[in-house]
Image (cartoon, rainbow, N blue to C red):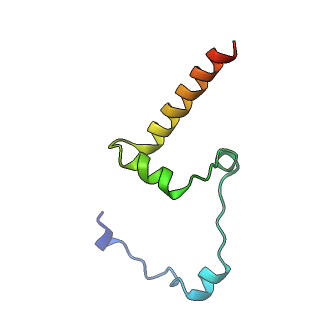
Amino acid sequence: MTDDEIDYSDIPPLTEEFFKNASLRIPTHQASNFVQLEPDIIKWFKEQGMDYQVLINQVLHRHIRDNSQQAS
């Protein structure tokens, strides 16, 4: 089924009132992993040409590994 074939007639329109009262709800398991990064950091990681979340995790793993060895 394509998007054009879907019948949306029974769904009420989203009004300004709806968005004024709306709130973001993040599932508990995801909320505990939420990290806010500055826009320039995200921009740099996105410019590296791969999935930036994967790259951020790789950098953090390397940092942990490198610093764990120094502490020993």
Residue at the image position 35 percent from the left and 49 percent from the top: 47
Left or right, 40 with respect to 18, comes to: left
- Vertical placement of 49 versus 12: above or below? above
Q: Number of callouts in the render? A: 0
Seen from the viewer's position, the closer of residues 4 and 30 is 30
Q: Quadrant of the N terminus?
A: bottom left
Residue at the image position 43 percent from the left and 44 percent from the top: 52
- The x and y percentages for residue 45 are 43, 46
Seen from the viewer's position, the closer of residues 55 and 18 is 55
- The x and y percentages for residue 23 are 66, 71
- Vertical placement of 3 versus 17: above or below? above
Residue at the image position 57 percent from the left and 28 percent from the top: 63
Which residue is situated farthest in the front direction here?
70
- The x and y percentages for residue 2 are 29, 65
Left or right, 28 with respect to 56, comes to: right
- The x and y percentages for residue 12 are 52, 83
Which residue is situated farthest in the top direction here?
72
Seen from the viewer's position, the closer of residues 44 and 7 is 44
Q: Quadrant of the C terminus?
A: top right
Q: Quadrant of residue 38?
A: bottom right
- Vertical placement of 30 versus 62: above or below? below
Q: Quadrant of residue 64?
A: top right
- Vertical placement of 64 versus 9: above or below? above
